[in-house]
Amino acid sequence: MELTIQGTPAVSNKSVWAGRVLSSLVILFLVFDGGIKLVPLDVVTETTAQLGYPGTASFARFLGVLTLVCTLLYAYPRTAVLGAILLTGYLGGAIATHVRIGNPLFSHTLFGVYLGLMIWGGLYLRDPRIRALIPFSR
């Protein structure tokens, strides 16, 4: 079965499944990340304080809820684009924080970029609406 939107090339089953797998990996990671912030573990509050934010359990829980809500929006097909946009903003804040405190570039600062590329790459592969907006090939 190939999905198509007027004026865009058909999306093969392999592309759709590759997008689902990529998106699933991102979703699993973000659910884990949000979950450990809900508990919150000591490492979460300590790291949050080291990054210059309040190192309180309530702030960590707030970040956990925010992460999980955005992730759920991304996981649900009808709101996946909204979820991807919100997650991109969230990751932009994380990137800015790492730049501000001078963390290592490739391991810390650009991690949000890597995750963002996976978010949008997975969505691009599985959603013909995104392919219509961003036509890499014609």
Image (cartoon, rainbow, N blue to C red):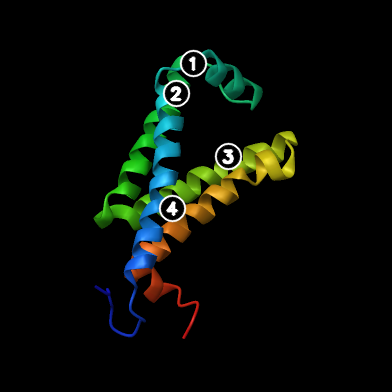
| Label 2 with label 1: CB-CB less than 8 Å | yes
Disc 2 residue type (three-letter): Ile
Q: Residue 41 — which label?
A: 1
Q: Residue 94 — which label?
A: 3
In primary-sequence order, the first of circles 3 and 2 is 2
Spatial CA distance of label 2 from label 4 is: 22 Å
Spatial CA distance of label 3 from label 4 is: 21 Å
From the viewer's perspective, is 6 left or right of 43?
left
From the viewer's perspective, is 71 left or right of 55?
left
Question: What residue is drawn where x is 33% and y is 78%?
Answer: 10
In the image, residue 31 sits, relative to residue 25, either above or below, namely above
Question: What residue is drawn where x is 40% and y is 59%?
Answer: 18
Residue holding disc 4:
22
* The image quarter in which residue 131 lies: bottom left
Q: Nearer the viewer, mark 3 or mark 4?
A: 4
Question: What residue is drawn where x is 75% and y is 36%?
Answer: 102
In primary-sequence order, the first of circles 3 and 4 is 4
Tell me where residue 2 appears, x and y as whole percent.
27, 75
Badge 4 density bin: few <14, some 14–19, many ≥20, Cα 10 Å:
some
Disc 3 residue type (three-letter): Ala
Residue holding disc 2:
36
